Image (tube, rainbow, N blue to C red):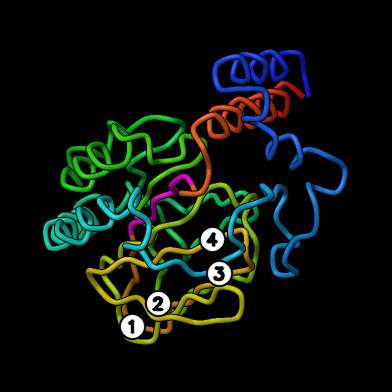
Amino acid sequence: MTPETEHAFARIRSEHGAGSLRRVERMLELGGGGPRHPLQRGAKWILPGLSATPWHEPRAHPELAPVVAALESAHPAIKAELDAAWRAHPEAFPDYAHYLMRQEDWRALHVYRDGAMVAETAAIVPTAHKVIQEYAVDTEKICPLLECHFSTLLPGASIAPHCDLWNFSINLHLAVDIPDGCGLTVAGETRAWQEGHCLLFDYSFEHAARNGGDRPRTCLLVDLWHPETTVPERRALVALVSEVRRLMDDG
């Protein structure tokens, strides 16, 4: 760790106790803090002690249930605004730049990115902005290291199996516009999105998606803190990852 990260960790320990970051420290040890599930082998960091559960029931976690309920309740307005944006502002849906890949048949409209709401899209998808701001950002349930965006797969598109970077955040999908023939596979189990409802999964597990339908498939994706992480761990993880990114940009 750099001196900046050490200083941030020390400050957190002074506020929350000497053992408050033990799991984060174990994660950074050689070997990543212990064994991991084989289908998490592609993830960079696995915070030990979190449930190794690929699929989560969206309303099972009290911390996340209000986000799920708000998004599902707002689905009709969110879908209407998405449809209008897709027709009137196609330039707002560029190719999605995933850290592992970039695909012309995978588009994204961002609501939250780089630790802040995206002001440029507030006017075209106001309901999504309002719900994410009120229920995810203001409540600090969103992981500020990641994002919230409308993820659109064009007909025939697929996302190859991959693991994302870590397990300390968790991915919520609101199914906004779903044609027949679509599926999301996580740790070998495939589920179908049901329009107006949410799916929740741990994307440190290998996962893949496909649109076998005849029109674009769109979900609203929200990167939320894993509900089993603690406040001091979240603060430390933000400091750690932010410093890693700074060093990568400087390098």
Residue 60, horizontal then vertical, whole percent: 36, 62
- Is residue 223 covered in magenta? yes
As drawn, is 50 to the left or to the right of 145? right
Q: Nearer the viewer, mark 3 or mark 1?
A: 3
Which residue is label 2 attached to?
A: 155
Q: Mark 4 highlights which residue?
A: 202
Work out whether mark 2 precedes mark 4 in sequence or the reverse, and give the earlier one: 2
Q: Residues within 10 Å of mark 3 (few under 14, many from 20)?
A: some
Q: Residue at x 22, y 37 (%)?
A: 134
Q: Position of residue 20 (x, y in %)?
A: 62, 30
Q: Amino acid at mark 2?
A: Pro
Q: Which numbered disc, 2 or 3, marks the residue closer to the eye?
A: 3
Q: CA distance from mark 4 to mark 1?
A: 28 Å
- State yes or no: discs 1 and 2 in contact (Cβ < 8 Å): yes
Figure label count:
4
Quarter holding the N terminus is top right
Which residue is under mark 3? 159
In the rendered structure, which amino acid carries the disc numbered 1?
Answer: Asp
Q: Please state the extent of the stretch shown in magenta in the rendering.
A: 220-225
Q: For mark 3, give the secondary structure.
A: strand
Checking the image for residue 214, the label placed there is 1
- Report how far apart the C-alphas of labels 1 and 2 lie in the structure: 5 Å
